[in-house]
């Protein structure tokens, strides 16, 4: 499965991406899309599920064991969650935010708002899990202190 996300300050003509600036690869079959990545682009790889090396020397490669990081999530935000690896994509979102240099603490409310938009009704119980997952991914790349302050702020609000 593949998903395109197009973000721009200008009008977007087509949601189809031919040369992405950033490519998120969560599993081995998705490595087939690596040739699409723009030169000097950024490849984010889930090394929990991908063991092969990309055949590109002209891109930045960021490796993170996002499924493993999600599996190790713990705390009250997991109440009722049988398999925390369902939040692996949110761990990768945290990796992405760290790689792009976003200030996670400044983005706490916005991240929470995005989750609240998509996780409605009975799925709203997964918001704290996903906030912790973003924190875990961000902390894996950027270091723990900033991520811990984000997590405390996210869980307090």
Image: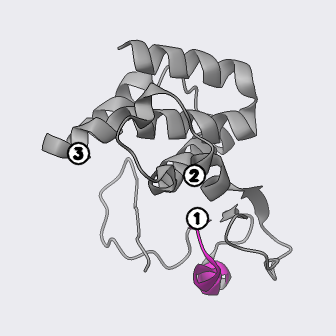
Q: Is residue 32 magenta?
A: yes
Distance, label 1 to label 2, CA atoms, is: 8 Å
Task: Kindly identify the residue that appears in the image at 58 percent across and 40 percent down.
Answer: 97
Between circles 3 and 1, the one closer to the viewer is 3
Between 128 and 99, the residue placed more toward the observer is 128
Q: 27 above or below 76?
A: below
Between 117 and 56, the residue placed more toward the observer is 117
Label 1–label 2 contact, CB within 8 A: yes
Write down the region rendered in magenta: 22-34
Q: Quadrant of the N terminus?
A: bottom left
Q: Residues within 10 Å of mark 3 (few under 14, many from 20)?
A: few
Label 3–label 1 contact, CB within 8 A: no
Q: Quadrant of the C terminus?
A: top left
Residue assigned mark 1: 24
Task: Kindly identify the residue that appears in the image at 62 percent across and 20 percent down.
Answer: 148
Residue assigned mark 3: 123
Residue 92 is tagged as 2
Q: Position of residue 127 (x, y in %)?
A: 34, 36
Q: Earlier in the sequence, mark 1 or mark 2?
A: 1
Q: 12 above or below 38?
A: above
């Amino acid at each position: 499965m593949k998903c395109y996300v197009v973000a721009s300050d200008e009008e977007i003509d087509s949601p189809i991406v031919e040369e992405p600036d950033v490519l998120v690869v969560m599993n081995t079959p998705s490595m087939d899309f690596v040739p699409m990545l723009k030169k000097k682009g950024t490849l984010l790889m889930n090394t929990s599920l991908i063991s092969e090396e990309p055949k590109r020397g002209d891109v930045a490669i960021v490796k993170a064991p996002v499924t493993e990081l999600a599996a190790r999530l713990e705390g009250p935000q997991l109440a009722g969650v049988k398999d925390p690896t369902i939040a692996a994509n949110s761990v990768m979102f945290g990796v992405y935010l760290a790689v792009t240099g976003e200030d996670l603490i400044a983005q706490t409310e916005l991240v929470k708002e995005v989750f609240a938009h998509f996780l409605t009704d009975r799925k709203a119980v997964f918001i704290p899990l996903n906030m912790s997952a973003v924190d875990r991914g961000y902390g894996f790349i950027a270091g723990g202190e900033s991520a811990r302050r984000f997590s405390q702020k996210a869980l307090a609000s």
